[in-house]
Image: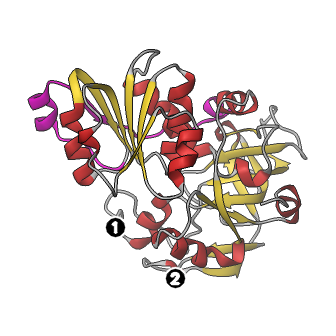
Amino acid sequence: MKAIQTDQYGGEEQLKMVEVAQPKAGKGQIVVRVLATSFNPIDVKRTSGNMKQVFPLQFPFVPGGDFSGVVDSVGEGVQQFKVGEEVYGYTPAGGAYAEYLAIDADKVAAKPKTLSHVDAAAVAMVAQTALQMLERGGVQKGQTVLIQGAGGAVGGIAVQAAHRRGAKVIATATGPSMQRVKDYGADEVIDYKAERFENRAKNVDVVLDTVGGDVQQRSFGVLKRGGVLVAITQPPSEEEAAKHQVKASMLLTEVNGEGLKKLAQIVDAGEIKPFVGKTFPLSEVAKGWEAARSGQVDGKIVFKVGTEASRSAGAE
């Protein structure tokens, strides 16, 4: 089978398409014929070597986490899936940039019926991250929530989910994503390139931070006493949290089959939807990574692997 592989730490120039052996389903596993996969920033961080102290890679390594496809074979002890079923999921160990993927059956769920494989490959990780951020923050009806980086994949889902909960949503974005974020249900959209968010966001109950750095540091000042900051890019300062008398934590997303089942129900109910900015064939993963790094694409980048993915996403 074809797969995108790297033999050493480095950038997208190290990614090569190669022929490798097709995996077999072990006990408790299924093999998925992958029809679409997508870009996540963690892929770059891991393959660059920046995270090798925490997540060392064994080479050759096939990147890729999110996927959508069809069950190709079922291993011993697996009863919840049958060959031919459409499924989606996320593999934290990598391996999704390939035509076939072996994965534990409890890390997979039936694909949302209302999504194409391209859209389904864009939603598993980011949507569960957004929903878990809301849970960690305790977002409730009537609260005011500031979502930093609302134009991004996680932030966009967070805006939709917070709006559905009845919260007042203040969002930061810029450029073409501003109207899209407003359409998602944001009550106020602040162009972070044109003005400082502190000038308009004050005494908020919850900050959902997908940006980090200086933005995270400044976010403490807009929280009311007893407020909550939830981050996903870097651990927030305990000193700043104590100084402002707020709670702050970093979320590490948990992705599993049960969470994916609930997510599929939410998606099929029309409560949230992913935004795919651009698609590439699997052979052009390096080009997709370059586009993501340079900020050329507004929305999620998805790689089409199989012909069915191309047909189901013909309008994109």
Secondary element under disc 1, as helix, strand or loop, is loop
The residue nearer to you, when weighing 60 against 269, is: 269
Q: x, y percentage for residue 185?
A: 55, 33
The residue nearer to you, when weighing 30 against 149, is: 149
Can you say whether 270 is above or below 199 in the image? above
The residue nearer to you, when weighing 145 against 266, is: 145
Question: In the image, is 72 to the left or to the right of 176?
Answer: right
Question: In the image, is 277 to the left or to the right of 120?
Answer: left
The residue nearer to you, when weighing 283 against 158, is: 158
What is the span of residues highlighted in magenta in the rendered image?
233-260
Q: What residue type is labelled 1?
A: Asn
Crowding around mark 2 (Cα neighbors within 10 Å: few <14, some 14 to 19, many 20+) is some
Q: Residue at x 62, y 44 (%)?
A: 124
Q: In which quarter of the image is the N terminus?
A: bottom right
Q: What residue type is labelled 2?
A: Gln
Instruction: Decide if residue 254 is in sight here.
Output: no
CA gap, disc 1 and disc 2 = 15 Å
Q: Name the residue under label 1.
A: 50
Label for residue 14? 2
Are the two marked residues, 1 and 2, in contact with CB atoms closer than 8 angstroms?
Answer: no
